[in-house]
Image (spheres, rainbow, N blue to C red):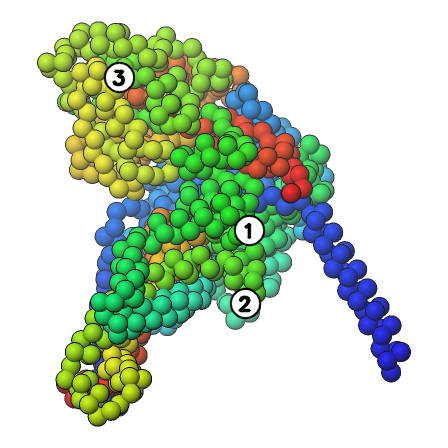
Amino acid sequence: MLVYLGKRLVYTIPIVIGVSVVCFGLVHIAPGDPLVSVLPPDASEELKMQMMRAYGFDRPYYEQFLLWCWRALQGDLGVSIATGRSVASEVFRAVKNTLLLSFVATFIGFFFGLLFGFVAGYFRNSPIDKIASILSVIGVSVPHYWLGMVLVIIFSVQLNWLPPTGAGPGGSADWQPDWAHLRHLILPAITMSVIPMGIVARTIRALVADILSQDFVPALRAKGLSELGIFGHVVKNAAPTALAVMGLQLGYLLGGSILIETVFSWPGTGFLLNAAIFQRDLPLLQGTILVLALFFVLLNLIVDVIQTAIDPRIQRS
Amino acid sequence: MRSTFRPALIAGAFALAGALLTSASVMAQEKVLRIGMTAADIPRTHGQPDQGFEGNRFTGIPMYDALVHWDLSKADAASVIIPGLALSWAVDATDKTKWTFRLRPGVKFHDGSPFNAAAVVWNVQKVLDQNAAHFDQSQVGVTVSRMPNLASARAIDDMTVELTTRNPDSFLPINLTNLFMASPTHWQKLLGEVPASVTDPKARAAAAWTAFAANPSGTGPFRGVRLVPRERFEMVANKDYWDAARRPKVDRVVLLPLPEPNARTAALLSGQVDWIEAPAPDSVPQIRQRGFTMYTNAQPHVWPWQFSFREGSPWLDRRVRHAANLCINRAELKELLGGLMEIPQGTVPPGHPWWGNPSFQIKYDLPAARRLMQEAGFSAARPLSVKVLTSASGSGQMQPIVMNEWLQQALKECFFNVELEVAEWNAVFTNWREGAGHANARGANATNVTFAAMDPFFAMIRFVTRQTNPPASNNWGFFNSDEFDQLAATARSTFDDAGRDSALAALHKRIVEEAPFLWVAHDVGPRAMSPRVTGVVQPRSWFIDIAPMDIRPGS
């Protein structure tokens, strides 16, 4: 197991390097002026050059990249051009908010996804299966930002039950698990949960149906095992795939959603990325993408390790 | 035991209830105005805001004063400059690069330190003197670009300061509306609090400015008290503000960045905020129907097509330019935009000090437009092909696709065959400085970039002189002539206010007559407010004064 873990850790090194190159490259390929947030377009050419020098954008790309990597290795992601604040502090504050939102959304999505998936798979072709399948198809198909707007119209604008924007009455800085703050979380979390719910439900349904059609199930029944016991075997067989799908979905959710966080003005990584893109704030953009990408790599590593622990066949292969 | 416990319990309950009632009544008494901005982040709060003019509007003007202010007290007249922290100013009789500003006595910063000539010099140095300890590169771009000629400052006495420009420049007082006065004493105190482990002087200065942004000190009618980055900024009333007419009536202002128009609208309709900037256009009828008030007024903003004058451009013929300006029924476009535009008659409207009464009248006159096109050799059988570079969105662009497609249809009536080249906003913006003919112009002979028209340089001069040809500035189409160079030079070197305005009027008159633009619309700065908000004056400006506003208690 340790050897496997070591190998997987080594494999992540080229991935991390690749991610860094892509992060840096993509934001520089995008059109626009990196100084747009601190320099109006009508600024003189002389002033523009002075600012380019001050921010180091006059250096060759490879030099900028190496300097950025060197600082990132030391935990310094630079300073936001637009705000002057440290990118690391900006990103970690946003990550904290996104984690909060995505864990709640994950709980909702996985709970209902697993429920619908197992029920639909176990009672295949029954009315319960049809209802659960319809719900999961809706979850996968409905554009979540659209759903978010509809929820806002119903629950905020018309009924005035829940707030449409923000992380709390005083912002996220003094967040507490009380009703005043939790009510801000409900609409974005539900909106964010529908896609993983649909994906998990559909995957689990197909998986359960497949497992139930395998020879060992009638054999278990013939041996006199109860339906609950058989269900336990189905769950155990479905677990590695379910874990992989859930791990990927969790990764997507932890990455934040630009659309959902923008619709609800939720101060997470998606909202931050949106602001960084529109302000062409390259250090912030690079730093945020890098942290999210590394997060994703780490999460995949954890899921791989857990999967291997559950199913030794993976390690052998 | 019971006998001693019970009275204590009762007394405690009364004390708690009393405390709760007191705090509830304090909260109920506090008048809070909550504003949903279009910005995706709180504009910088250290005195030189970013986020364009929205920054000046919300974290500049409310917290800081400049030497010269915009008059934001009238809705029915052009917003002009008035004395701010300077009581008066005059250019030197012999050396026109030197200006003397007499300062307003008795003004104090929020930290209690006095405003004086040394503070002005310090604030000029923060963006112009790279050797100054408090020089801040991050404030340079947004400030120096708006006062390009200012070179230095010198204190003559405690209440008099001399400003020097690189060249004689009569626009300096207007430019100075963008230089906000931050407190040197407060900054120095915050510098002293930077940990000793930070040894690099530049890093210490940057840390002090970051601390200043979180705990700002200006001289304005509001004082910043709480910054939650990217989420909210709170300001409280400065009850000792020097201008009694602008002493705030609300106790607290909360700024919330809500960049998504539907989110802003929902926040207003659900009562989460009392005021939103630029509501989603489709929601305006609903906003009105639910009792909210829409405020609009013509802004010094121009939504144009800027023509190319390079060889081979179809716009070289003045008849064609006039025909385009006469061909479009702007009232129809206004209806299409739900009334959220003003019909332009030039870069500035009639009645503005720079209007100048041009002989060419911008209006809808289809027969005249067709006649001009026919005289120029075009007809339905022989249409004129033009190509316009535009964006799908962008700051100040209003609804560019809808508007350009409408123009495409409207100009067909006058034998124009319009091809729209839609590019990403920043690419269009960047090309504005590269000029027509550059590869990034993609063969377009007109570009659609909107602009603010508050300052004479940014409203007119940068579009019509050789000096401002790309890449120096935004004369994208290379509209060049000796006459316009001379008119611009005259305006810049006329130092009495009336004479300068008269020279600018002469320039504006000739610009309209030569029509290097298709003037399509002025934005109206729509904002929606709760009917509880009172004392609102929406001036003909990009800015609005929060200080005189009040808010009635909520239901």
On the picture, is B179 further left or further right than A313? right
Co-location on one chain, circles 3 and 1: yes
- Viewer-proximal residue among A164 and B301: A164
Residue at 26 percent of width and 85 percent of height: A230
Circle number at residue A177: 2
SS category of the residue bearing label 2:
loop
Q: In the rendered structure, which disc, 3 or 1, sits on the residue that comes first in sequence?
A: 1
Q: CA distance from mark 2 to mark 1?
A: 22 Å
Q: The disc labelled 2 sits on which kind of residue?
A: Pro
Residue ID for mark 3: B324
Residue at the far right: name it: B3
Q: Residue at x 26, y 42 (%)?
A: B424
Circles 2 and 1: CB distance less than 8 Å?
no
Tag 1 secondary structure: strand
Q: Chain of mark 3?
A: B
User: How many labels were placed on the picture?
Assistant: 3
Residue B91 picture location, percent across and down: 55, 26
Q: Position of residue B491 (x, y in %)?
A: 44, 20
Question: What is the x, y in percent for residue A310?
Answer: 27, 86
Bin the neighbour count of mark 3 within 10 Å (Cα to Cα): few under 14, some 14-19, many 20 and up. Answer: many
Task: State left or right for residue A245 relative to residue A182.
Answer: left
In terms of depth relative to the viewer, which is nearer, A288 or A264? A264
Residue of label 1: B233
Viewer-nearest of discs 2 and 3: 2
Q: CA distance from mark 3 to mark 1?
A: 46 Å
